[in-house]
Image (cartoon, helix red, strand yellow):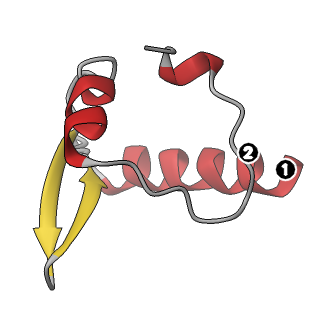
Amino acid sequence: MEKLADMQLNTDKVLLDEDVQNKLLSELPQWEISRRDAVRQLRRVFKWRNFAEALAFANEVAMLAEEN
């Protein structure tokens, strides 16, 4: 199977069966697949020591989003 980092994905929805999702999940440490309203979602919980660290992370994510 192709590694997640090597997959060419477009902006359309990509639906993978549960077996493929679980295999690819092994490449994402600290991430999990959870269900919300019967929909499987990729999830990770981030924790910081204080608000300033959390805000710095949010700002970095925002900068990356603006680049793409």
Percent x, y of residue 53: 40, 43
Percent x, y of residue 43: 25, 52
The circle on residue 68 is: 1
Query: On screen, 30 above or below 53?
Result: above
Q: Which residue is mark 2?
A: 64
Task: Tell me what residue is drawn at x 54 percent, y 56 percent.
Answer: 14
Front position in the image: 33 or 12: 12
Task: Tell me what residue is drawn at x 18 percent, y 49 percent.
Answer: 33
Task: Tell me what residue is drawn at x 30 percent, y 34 percent.
Answer: 20
The crowding category of the residue bearing disc 2, from other C-alpha atoms within 10 Å (few below 14, some 14 to 19, many at least 20), is: few
Query: The residue under label 2 is which amino acid type?
Result: Leu
Query: On screen, 24 above or below 56?
Result: above
| Disc 2 to disc 1: CB gap under 8 Å | yes
**On the picture, is 52 further left or further right than 14?**
left
Q: Quadrant of residue 28?
A: top left
**On the picture, is 10 further left or further right than 33?**
right
Q: CA distance from mark 2 to mark 1?
A: 7 Å
Image quadrant holding the N terminus, namely top left
Percent x, y of residue 61: 61, 49
